[in-house]
Amino acid sequence: MRQQICAALLFSLSLLGQTYDTVLANGRVMDPESGLDAVRYIGIRGRRIEAISPTPLEGRTIVDVRGLVVAPGFIDLHSHGQDNENYHFKAHDGVTTALELEIGVSPVAPWYQAREGKALINFGASSGHVPSKMAVMHDTGDFLPRDHAVHDMATDEQKLSIVNSVRQGLDDGAVGIGFGIAYVPSTTREEILRLFQLGSDRHVPVFVHMRGNTGLPEDGAIPSLQEVIADATATGVSLHIVHITSSGGRQTKNCLTIIEGARKHGLDVSTEMYPYTASATRIESALFDEGWEKRTGLRYDQLQWVATGERLTAETFAKYRKQGGGVISHGMSEDTVRLAVANPIVMIASDGRLTNGKGHPRSAGTFSRVLGVYVREQKALPLMDALRKMTLMPAQRLEASVPAMRNKGRIKVGADADIVVFNPDKVIDKATFENAAQYSEGIENVMVAGVFVLRNGNFVDGVYPGAGLRTK
């Protein structure tokens, strides 16, 4: 005990005379990596955390965050909304890094270039199989394919072009390889295996929306999971399976058992979920090809048209299917959500995208909903466990291939000052299925690279500290 007191005293003395750019004072600092959960003073200089002290620090700016939780900024591995409209909602949900890793992008280099110096929060993307395939096969879809990439079998020459396109994206620093296999059901298993091998050769993860939903009996949730588990085993690639609750559906528990077993036997596989009982996608996509009711178990009235909030009928489904646009599917159970959110291997990720204020509420409220509903109200998991799923776990998922992630997801000396400060008694999502464009409440301060983007619950104008995250 005497040695601990002396060490603390010496540490405090070493900080005397230091002046920091910003000091977060009196906050309840929670760091999932070290397990720290105590009142501390955090000294920030430039873009880094330079001191964590039990005693007061001097700073040019001192912000009293007494009674609030100070945590690493949330890292969203699955964020389709990659513009400042979406970044504003992300910041108000405590997110400091939002990555487009499922569908990904192509070409990669201009995508990063378009955001450098203009982003509120950190950003990044995978090299996408789907957009590469859409380009090579001249699909007429927008964000997701709707014709040639869905139904046409790629020739050997087209397959080579797709692989070369994905490889070029990796050369340009993409975070990994993204797959939306369910949206391109004509894709052969050989094509997926080949790209998994590319990911392994380049030492980057693959981020996968499993096959499923093609109408073939062998393509349910469990066989689809077994496909990617087998490919990962054969190639040695790091595998991340997106939104396990919406892909797994009624089989989520069994899917988690398979993933846990694979991890126990040495496979590098991880997964994520969003805390809502409804999914969302494009109505013109392959998920709603003929026979969708039988495959999904959904009815027309369980589909909600994003643009108007109306529930669909056979007539309006046909109309909007031809038109194209966003649709929400109310098909998951609350029990499934609670099961996954409490599971220690499941990360939190939004799968969010708002366009002109329209979309799924997960786009604006995912992280606050976990903290408000599942931690505070339902007590489905402890606060530290929830924070781990939003910060340390996603950082660790990427840090082997993305060096910058080694200094994110933690509150420690030397880490990036990507920080969220929130009120644990008030934090809650406000976005709804009828009005998704509503900021979460209880997120008080958000810093990206030591710069406030949210201060006392209000945005700071004219700051764009977000940086692109790459493999190099």
Image (tube, grey):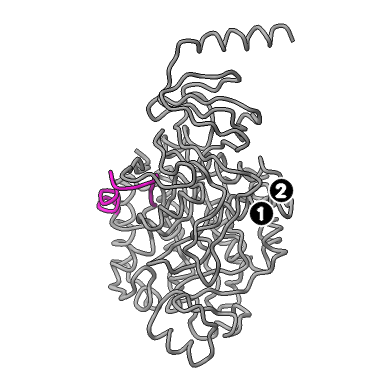
Q: Is residue 234 above or below residue 294?
A: above
User: Would you identify the image quadrant in which residue 389 lies?
Assistant: top right
Q: CA distance from mark 2 to mark 1?
A: 8 Å
Q: Which residue is mark 2?
A: 381
Viewer-proximal residue among 386 and 38: 38
- In the picture, the disc for residue 121 is none
**Which percent across, then down, holds residue 106?**
31, 58
Name the element at disc 1: helix
**Which percent across, then down, holds residue 431?**
54, 63
**How many labels sit on residues?**
2
Q: Which residue is mark 1?
A: 341
Mark 2 or 1, nearer chain start: 1
> Label 2: how many residues lie within 10 Å, few (<14), some (14-19) or many (20+)?
some
**Which percent across, then down, holds residue 301?**
59, 84
User: Would you identify the image quadrant in which residue 253 lies?
Assistant: bottom right
Q: Is residue 74 magenta?
A: no
Name the image quarter holding the C terminus: top left
Viewer-proximal residue among 50 and 470: 50
Q: Is residue 110 magenta?
A: yes
Q: Please identify the residue farthest to the bottom as the structure is shown.
A: 315
**Which percent across, then down, holds residue 213?**
55, 74
Q: Is residue 15 above or below residue 134?
A: above
Viewer-proximal residue among 57 and 464: 57
The magenta span reads: 108-125
- Residue at the image point whose x is 51% and y is 78% from the top: 309
Name the element at disc 2: loop
Residue contact between numbered discs 2 and 1, judged by CB atoms under 8 Å: yes
Q: Label 2 sits on what residue type?
A: Leu
Q: Label 1 sits on what residue type?
A: Val
